[in-house]
Image: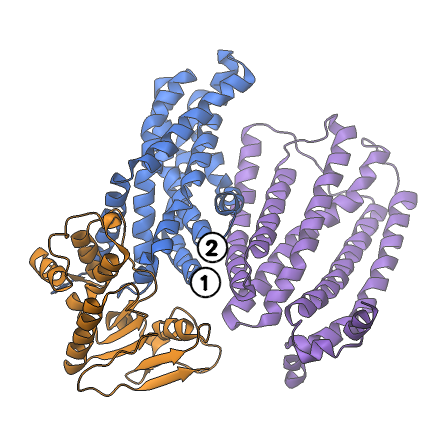
Chain colours: A purple, B blue, C orange
Amino acid sequence: MAINWFKYSAPTNFYGLAGKLIPFFAWPAAIFFVIGIYIGFFIAPTDATQSEAYRIIFLHVPASILSMFIYLIMAGYAALGLIFKTRLSAMMAQALAPTGALFAFISLWSGALWGKPMWGAWWVWDARLTSELILLFLYLGFIALQASIEDPRRGDRASALLAIVGSVNVPIIYFSVKWWNTLHQGSTIKYSGTSMHIAMQQAMFSILIACWLYAIAVTLARVRCIILEREANTTWVNGLPEVKQSEVRS
Amino acid sequence: MNKLSLIGLFGLVVRRDLLLAMRRRADVLTTLIFFVMVVSLFPLGVGPEMDMLRKMASGVVWVAALLASMLSLPRMFSADHADGTLEQMMLAPQSLSVLVLGKIVAHWMLSGLPLALIAPVLGLQFDMPPQALWILVLALLLGTPVLSMIGAVGAALTLGLRGGGVLVSLLVLPLCIPVLIFGAGAVEAVTSGMSVVSNLSFLGAFMLFALVFTPFVAAQALRISME
Amino acid sequence: MQVQGANGSGKTSLLRTLCGFIRPDEGEIRWRGKRVGDLGEDYHAELLYLGHLNAIKDELNALENLQMSAGMAGYQVTEQQAIAALRRMGLQRREHLPVRVLSQGQRRRVALARLLTSAAHLWILDEPLTALDVGAVGLMQELIGEHLSNGGMTIFTTHQPLQVAGVETRQLTLI
């Protein structure tokens, strides 16, 4: 069994495996998303204090959780790539970054949409939203650094170092922002407390699973593109049916 | 020929950078002038009411210090990289981390230290009370080394890249936010009557933490960039 | 050993890999039987590298540059020793001028003066003869000869032929 797994750590073999796995994640993602939306919008009751607008948290909370989770996974892959010098780990980190940034962005935007009816302002400097904003900056920095370095080997290692430094800093940043927020008596966005209606919990959980599966599917697709890009000059890539087809057409 | 010890080599690196800066005084002065200008921009942007300016004071001075430090970061390694002396440093018979620490110390003495010393003058422009001015200097003395240290990692990672200064700032600014929060917080605590010591001790903790880790990380980043 | 090859064949990369800047994808580099990566700073202590760049600071004068280079390599050089070295390199009366007013050839000589003050066993020189006139080339041949007869080792690349009297040079040609 061990030999089987190592085989897939080579980009050549992983390419095929990833392609086959994508539908297994994409379809369930769509299904869970539909279930979650249905429960969230039609079954969950109207909140006493926050009326209909609160339903945006069904997207906001999963997006936040996932943006942080993906950052850690990305840093983990980056560290693996740096320590064990495996090419695929570095490619996975590169593939995860845009999805993580997207979730951070969705979290911010959905937080703003929630804030407007609640607080009357499009943005409140809530501790969690502010930390989320900083997380988005960290993602963008990672992507920018990789984009600025032409040599893929240096690019992988430099951005890996950045990701590791970032992940060490994330708890420090979160704590500092919380402190700053309490100091200045800023507004706090509270979710409906611990006594959430069971339907709300189900909706949120369902969408969380959906987002997670979506992230996996999209990352697998993206890593396939990255593999093609990086190994563009090798024989195995030029022998692939999709590459041959696009050559014929052009 | 006498062999140089680790401390000796550290001292040599610091002295060298200071000597070079003395022969190119413009670099140090431009950072300082930038700092003063940025601080002066805020009242021009928000209006001269002293009440508002007093509230903004610590934040404004800190943000300006942050930006001014960012400005001088690319210079940490780029000159040495361009003429080949960085390569020689990497071939030194002592730990690269210590040499990098030497460069960081020299950089701080040429950017952070002057900023901290000139800050009280700017604080007066915002009508800060005397105790606040003292705390401002102390907080900057604790916080600017951290900026230089984290900045060193950023400068090492972006060595030789196009878009240098802006890219370094993009990478380093988010990581410096805790320093900003506790630094500005320390000064505000004076006027709001809250605990100054807790803010300052966080700054101190950051500085120690950075001191232990950043030279090594920056040395690794240099090796990655020089390959 | 002389490393030869057309432009772009990887001579500089090979030399830099020997210095430890680049990690080889395959194989390993050993000095006196131990892996260079494990030796770390001990290897650096026995190595002197001169690349395409001179590694001198424009703002300092020749004397200061030489003392700094020596310091960076881990040892102190007195002013007399430094001046004597610069004199041998043909830079008498120019020791106190800032290097930025010297010509390219003179700057290369300042960089090469390090060879005289160094105690390193292994010299790795990447195109050391660039910008040097005939006299300086002859001087280089002398220096390398002396180094070899003292038990040292030299690996260099050059487009000009460089013969050292009485010593057989091994050739390595890269394709």
**Disc 1 target residue:** B224
**Amino acid type, mark 1:** Ile
Q: Residue furthest front?
A: C134
Q: Is residue C156 left or right of residue B189?
A: left
Above or below residue B3? Residue B152 is: above
Above or below residue A43? Residue C26 is: below
Residue B1: quadrant of the picture: bottom left
Q: In terms of sequence position, does the residue under pointer 2 or pointer 1 come before the other?
A: 2
Q: Secondary structure at mark 1?
A: helix
| C67 or B68: nearer the viewer | C67
Q: Which mark is residue C21?
A: none
The reply to whether the C-beta atoms of the residues labelled 2 and 1 are less than 8 Å apart is yes
- Alpha carbons under labels 2 and 1: distance apart: 8 Å
Q: Residues within 10 Å of mark 2 (few under 14, many from 20)?
A: many
| C26 or A70: nearer the viewer | C26
Residue in the image at 28% along x and 57% along y: C104
| A226 or C126: nearer the viewer | C126
**Disc 2 target residue:** B157
Q: Residue furthest right?
A: A42
Residue A222: quadrant of the picture: bottom right
Above or below residue A84? Residue B20 is: above
| Residue C72 in sight in this render | no
